[in-house]
Amino acid sequence: MRCPFCGHDDTQVKDLRPTEDHAAIRRRRYCPACGARWTTFERVHLRELTVIKKNGERTTFDREKLLRSLRIALRKRPVDDDRIERVVNSIQRRLETLGESEIPSKVIGEMAMEQLAQLDQVGYVRFASVYRNFREAKDFEDFVESLSDR
């Protein structure tokens, strides 16, 4: 692997171990040219997923985008990063096992909402406010009221 700092082609793996949920391999790498150290992750990739957005545009599924969205929704909440990783891994596995290579963004959003509802109510409301495009305070009130009705 090429060093991300100096571009040297011959880097070394110093440490190798599975992640806590055993969904990926964590590699600690070292560049003998500049001395830099960094971490890479290797994950199973069952199939190439294409996301069909509301406007019909097609893009490649980006797990990092989903991870960022969940982290934003759960910012300053008592939820460990490892739990967020496990949620994203779970959603990605479910998407890959659907048997479809093209998935509407609505399906991904609903899976994320479902997971957040179980993980953290505040994060759930935050995510919903963006996902469902709340325009005014009344939208929040109606959504939170629907939660308490359940």
Image (cartoon, rainbow, N blue to C red):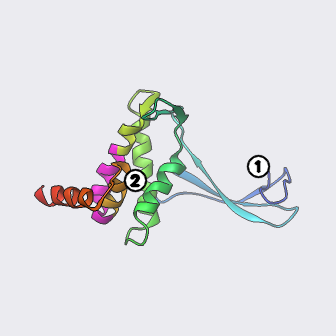
Rendered residue at 84%/50% (across/down): 9
The quarter of the displayed image where residue 117 is located: bottom left
Residue 52 coordinates in the image, percent (x, y): 46, 32
- The 10 Å Cα crowd at callout 1, few under 14, some 14 to 19, many 20 or more, is few
Rendered residue at 79%/50% (across/down): 2
Residue 124 coordinates in the image, percent (x, y): 31, 58
Q: Please say if the residues under marks 1 and 2 sit with CB atoms less than 8 Å apart.
A: no
Above or below — where is 98 with respect to 38? above
- The 10 Å Cα crowd at callout 2, few under 14, some 14 to 19, many 20 or more, is many
Front-most of residues 132 and 5: 132
Residue with the mark numbered 1: 1
Which structural element holds mark 2?
helix
Residue with the mark numbered 2: 87
The image's mark for residue 123 is: none
Q: Quadrant of the C terminus?
A: bottom left
User: Which residue is the extreme one toward the left?
Assistant: 149
User: Type of residue at label 2?
Assistant: Val
Q: Magenta segment: does it hold 114?
A: yes
Lower position in the chain sequence, tag 1 or tag 2? 1
Front-most of residues 122 and 3: 122
Residue numbers of the magenta segment: 110-122
Which structural element holds mark 1?
loop
Front-most of residues 43 and 149: 149
Taken as a whole, is the magenta stretch helix, strand or loop?
A: helix
Number of the front mark, 1 or 2: 2
Residue 26 coordinates in the image, percent (x, y): 60, 56
Rendered residue at 38%/53% (across/down): 130
User: Type of residue at label 1?
Assistant: Met
Residue 17 visible in the picture: yes
The quarter of the displayed image where residue 148 is located: bottom left
